[in-house]
Amino acid sequence: MSQSPRPFRFGVSFLTVGSRTSWHARVREAADLGYDVLQVADHLGTAAPFPALVSAAEVTRMRLGTFVLNAGVLTPAYLARDVADVQRLTDGRLELGLGAGYVPAEFEAVGLPFGTGGERLGKLAETLAATRALLAAEADAPRPPILLGGAGDRMLRFAGREADIFSFSIMAGVTANMAPEDALARRVGILREGAGERFSDIELNLFVAAVAGSPATADLTIVRQASGFPDDELTKLPGVLVGPPRELADRLERYRERFGITYISVLEPHMAVFAEVIKLLR
């Protein structure tokens, strides 16, 4: 007897906070639009994730996630302390998203070398292992699910062994001489190889950087900066959703069937537009 597909979940990622009053209003709006998870990014110049999430917990029952922390500039002792208390203060609703870091200026700001991709992944692995050990030693052993994100082969294999949730970045649909969906399928396959028998336990997340009803109204600024591709190529990426709600809902159903992707995260500027798609997938 075949298993029922995992139900969809929907996250919305915020970059700024503002005043307490305005922040709480935006959090409530996200909940009212049908989102399951409120996520806060981790970049210099944007919101501080942990205070924002604790404040959000006052006015919503959504789950709360870091999307994603730069492990390259963190120490396990301080990270474990903060994670433990955020998990407690949010009644166990934290999803701990971690990445290897990809912005050189953020390493420079704290006086650390950017290093190679392999070195950054090694630091992520060390930080995750040490943080888990410190959390396990706490009396209440707080253990939020771990979300890892990226697109590189080594990250995928590592996440296959370690992640509870894996988030495919906008670059997951990019491989030379390969159609975007085939590139994503290749990366799902690498994650599957790394995970082995535990693959079915990993929830697959797709980061969506742009949502629009038509190419003419699509704000592709973030995707363009991340990839350097021309706009006509960007709209073909799995992480760019352009079209009427029914078409986009059908596309995400196809992603669930073909790839097993059931957790979709969009940026705050697109949350109202994407809410129309959510209604069709519930």
Image (spheres, grey):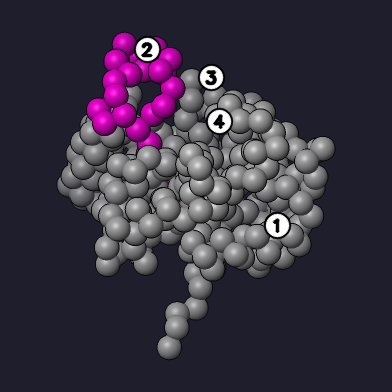
For the residues labelled 2 and 3, the Cα–Cα distance comes to 14 Å
- Horizontal and vertical percent for residue 222? 62, 30
Left or right of 14, for residue 213: right
Residue 58 in view: no
Name the element at disc 2: helix
Q: Is residue 118 magenta?
A: yes
Q: Which residue is mark 4?
A: 227
Which residue type carries mark 1?
Answer: Leu
Q: Which residues are magenta?
A: 92-119
For the residues labelled 3 and 1, the Cα–Cα distance comes to 32 Å
Q: Is residue 19 magenta?
A: no
Q: Nearer the viewer, residue 99 or 160?
A: 160
Q: Nearer the viewer, mark 4 or mark 3?
A: 4
Name the element at disc 3: loop
For the residues labelled 4 and 3, the Cα–Cα distance comes to 21 Å
For image coordinates 72% across by 53% down, the residue present is: 275
For the residues labelled 1 and 2, the Cα–Cα distance comes to 40 Å
Tell me the quarter of the image containing the C terminus. Answer: bottom right
Q: Nearer the viewer, mark 1 or mark 2?
A: 1
Q: Which residue is mark 1?
A: 248
Name the element at disc 4: helix
- Horizontal and vertical percent for residue 153? 34, 43
